Image (tube, grey):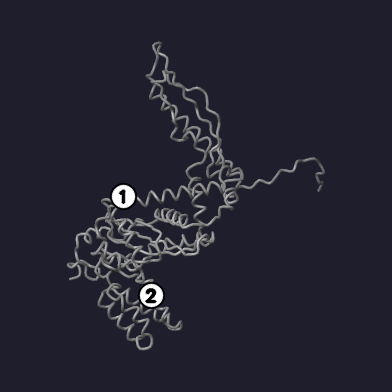
Amino acid sequence: MREDSGSAAVLPSVSAQDVLGEILREGAQRMLAKAVQAEVAEWIDARRDVVDKHGRQQVVRNGYMPKRSILTGLGEIEVEQPRVHDRRSSEERERFTSKILPPYLRKSKSIEELIPWLYLKGISTGDFPEALAALVGEDAKGLSANTVTRLKQEWEREQEAWSKRSLTNKEYVYIWVDGVHFNIRLEEDRQCILVLMGATKEGQKELIAIQDGFRESEQSWKELLLDVKARGLAIDPKVAVGDGALGFWKAVKQVFPTTREQRCWVHKTANVLDKLPKHLQPKAKEKLHAIWMSDTRKHAERAFEEFLATYEAKYAKACECLKKDRDELLTFYDFPAEHWMHLRTTNPIESTFATVRLRHRKTKGNGTRKACLAMVFKLMQSAAKRWRALNGSELLADVIAGIPFQDGLKPQAAA
């Protein structure tokens, strides 16, 4: 077979991904151009009756404005916006402003959201240019470490404003509380952030407050609770769920005296098992699980006694840890069975803070307490978009009305 010795040009390899990306960018550019032209045409058409004494239309197209580039998730897209000319006097003249392409838009909304998402998911400030180039192309401009620094300052202002918002007319049927500790690079003491979440009467979970506390002391929790009450939270929650070690419990009795206490079974289980030898822990965990997974309070009490009978003689400290919160561990039986999975643990907070801790480890801690508080706020805001409503949300009306439940059922249903 004869070989070509010649001068055929060697074509550079082009990946299917590059070709597809270019096709998508071109398609997006055409769609954007059509959308802006339609927007301008509609605006002018709405003023077609504005004419001068000679019958000439006063609001008309007048060429195009200078081209500009918008950074999108597909890379940079060059757009050209029609210019609108209003011939009327300055007192009557209207200025057209595109809702699709605001005057100073340089990045699409998805890119604006991408920046905090990358930061909060663990990309360090110095690695930003490389990470963004990989996602939106090497031609990404204006997205640098300084962008993230400015964003963090904005997050701090957002968090401060959010912390002062009114809670008037708010009612939270259930609340979850926890204290989460962080290392701060520029300070010796660890930071404890106090978190308060709630379930509204419609069954939606909401972040109520986050505050920089002094450990998990009674005074710190009291300050937080008094603050939310001063901002309008006038109705006592029906149940509060938290770890038994919190100073929260003394504080809540002073601020919301009718709120009932439910200890978190995840925390309690960990605390009890910590006081048992490791070789006994798997079996002991099963017995603890049998308590809070019982279908009635009577069966839970029986499982409770079985645990004590099994371990009390040799492991009194473990049993004392369990016994001291006995009533508070079983509060959930007086509320709808559909709500038990939400009331037995502080999982709504714990699961959210898994992401927070990931970010914290990636960056080896925040530099200041204020920056850490802002980061927690933004991460929880992001997580809140995925929070689902409580099971059996319609039963919250009965809880608010004070209807008693027996083993998770209404009296007539239990009979």
Q: Foreground: 94 or 414?
A: 94
Instruction: Judge left or right: residue 363 versus residue 322.
Output: right
Q: Foreground: 42 or 356?
A: 356
Say which amino acid is labelled 1: Ser
| Marks 2 and 1, the one that precedes in the sequence | 1
Instruction: Judge left or right: residue 338 versus residue 148.
Output: left
Q: Foreground: 66 or 317?
A: 317
Residue 207 in the image: x percent, y percent?
36, 56
Taking the spot 61% from the left edge, 47% from the top edge, the residue there is: 16
In the rendered image, which quarter is residue 39 located in?
A: top left
- In the rendered view, would you say 236 is above or below 280? above
Mark 2 surroundings within 10 Å by alpha-carbon count, few (fewer than 14), some (14 through 19), many (20 or more): some
What label sits on residue 269 in the rendered view? 2
What label sits on residue 218 in the rendered view? none
Residue 156 in the image: x percent, y percent?
44, 50
Q: CA distance from mark 2 to mark 1?
A: 37 Å
Say which amino acid is labelled 2: Thr
Which residue is labeled 1 in the image? Answer: 166
- The residue furthest top is 54
Taking the spot 50% from the left edge, 33% from the top edge, the residue there is: 33
Taking the spot 27% from the left edge, 67% from the top edge, the residue there is: 337
Residue 99 in the image: x percent, y percent?
43, 34
Mark 1 surroundings within 10 Å by alpha-carbon count, few (fewer than 14), some (14 through 19), many (20 or more): some
Instruction: Judge left or right: residue 175 versus residue 282.
Output: left
Nearer the camera: disc 2 or disc 1: 1
